[in-house]
Image (tube, rainbow, N blue to C red):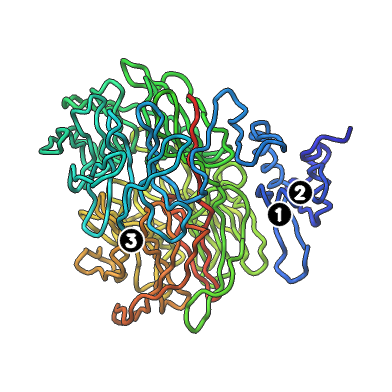
Amino acid sequence: MGDPPGPKPSSLPQALHSRLDSWKEIANFLGRGIRTVQRWEREEGLPVHRLAHDKRGSVYAQRDELAAWWDRRRVTLSAQPPDDVPSDATAAAHSPSRLERITRTTSMTSWPALSSDARLIAYVSDAGQSGTTPQIWVQQIGGAALRLTNGEREYSRLSFSPDDTHIVFAAADDAGQNVYEVPTLGGDARLLQRDASCGQLCPDGQWLVCVPRNAVGIRVAARDGIGFRTVAPELVDVACATWMPDGRAVVVHARPGPMLEPDWWVVPVDGGSPTNTTVVRRFRERGMFTIPTGLACVGESLVFSAAGPPHGVCLYRQRLTPSTFEPAGAPEQLSPGIESTWLPSVAAGRVAFVSSRADSNLWSVALERDTGLARGPLRRLTRGPFPLGYLSLTDDFRTLAYFSYRLGRGEVFIRDLHSGLERVLSEAPAGDKGYPAISPSGNLVAYGLRMPGGERAPRPILIATLGDGTWRQLGEDCGGRPREWIDERHLVIERFERLNSIAVIDTDTGEQHDLVRSGEQSIKNPRLSPDRQWVAFDASRPGEAAGVFVAPMRESPVVESDWVAVDRFASHPFWSADGRLLYYMPSGTNPLIRSVVRGRHFESASGAFPREPMTVYASTEMMMPAYIPGTAPIATPDEIILVLGDFTGDIWLMDL
């Protein structure tokens, strides 16, 4: 019998950061044949790099990256089906929890909802027809699907009425977002609540709960939707609302104040005081973050998705103590972590969820210098199913800094775009690192640490000097994360509070001042023009779609009346290398992803956009995960670098 696969024990004590410079060396290190490791690189994200020249087959790998990849693979290897299992089976099909695949289109599918007996399922899907508007569908488990809608709107937040005769949903268009219901077997939709989302009927069918457009408090209305009252008005940034089984309270994801951290809260609908479950805080202390887009309640437990090493995005069940609603014991991981699993819906002892590939990576597409348009095929820069983002470039466009979970924890990577070589930022204390911003000269990198905390988690900023390997901490709590340097001293940060804002911090003195200010809109994704005369950003009111704007750089804060609108339904702006074009990602009918890059010519002297928008790049397969922070692309004179992945997926059903 041959040696078991995996990194050889004799190899590990050697210089772990040394390179393996051929397929043969990589195969020997992992104890497998060359064809096997080439398949692992192609299908399973084995971290193999290619040298930046035309010689075919010139590859290399870092020992530490291979060892980390192998450790993650061992966790899920035992859960994977053997080779003779049909390809549409998954790990859980051979576990005590029976797993059943519901849809088979490998489409953009989301927002599943189960009927009370778990015999019907509704969901939003493009049915595998790329480029079309996703619609609401309903089907009997094992049967054919029936389309219920036809509109050019963004559908989300589906749920069944308690008697299963209607499906409640949110729909958004240019006029705003409202809550509707439609008969389960087809018919006309009926408006229930205007300027609201996350609608759901209570277990006895008498009351409708929903989230108002400003995301402050919870609306409780009669079943017919006439009139409403607001409960828990002290909660802000309310992201979703789900009834508890007894019908006396709802669980919401919200902040208890503008400056405080969000968590899952239990809100009595009779107007009693909300109770913090502290579930999000406890996950944060473990280096993980919960995903507030979906939640299900079953018995005395919450079922939701959370992301973090080593398993990626998985479903978890957290039991609560009935009297206090505090966590009772450790969370239970429900899905094996082979793919991203999220948006749970629970009924009759079963949970439905979306399972999609978790292969978000850096890609690039070439640019025509004279037109600013993308040309040619995509080129992959990284490999593996790892969350990544926060791209930052030096002024000479040679060095890229970005964040990734590639090594099983949050790290900052420094990449030479000419050679393709990269390294992990080692000028730092221990801990999960993220939010990198590299200075114009490439000498400094600002970054943040993921810090545990209570209702208000500290957000320190650290400054690493790449030349001599030193680092320093800029305050215990800077109130935000780095985004981009103005020069070698002043840094733009994105403040994290109820309405995100943009500020400038002096990295010598620690003093801050507002750069762009709004009393009503949340300002995100700032990008400075190459001449540092303008800042582009996206902004949105709670519950509304984001728009892209530019504002002049100046000492006093720029108020809304001085903003220049670029596109009212778009986000994630970034500049061309010469500053003559502003690129951005227009919103589509699916708020979770972006698939198109547009550009507008810009006159820096006047702040005008003299021409209409043009489509720079469009993709029907690889998508940008807009629901993950920090995924805005970045441009060099020759290419656009994007965070893209295959986020198509299907709905599965699992026994609880």
Which structural element holds mark 2?
helix
Query: What is the number of the mark on residue 48?
Result: 1
Disc 3: which residue: 538
User: The residue under label 2 is which amino acid type?
Assistant: Val
User: The residue under label 3 is which amino acid type?
Assistant: Asp
Q: Mark 3 or mark 2: which comes first in sequence? A: 2
Q: Position of residue 579 (x, y in %)?
A: 42, 76
Q: Nearer the viewer, residue 421 or 639?
A: 639
Which structural element holds mark 3?
strand
Above or below, 143 relative to 467: above
Disc 2: which residue: 37
Above or below, 7 relative to 383: above
Q: Mark 1 or mark 2: which comes first in sequence? A: 2
Q: Are marks 1 and 2 in contact (CB under 8 Å)?
A: yes
For the residues marked 3 and 2, what is the alpha-carbon distance in whole angstroms? 43 Å
Q: Position of residue 502 (x, y in %)?
A: 32, 57
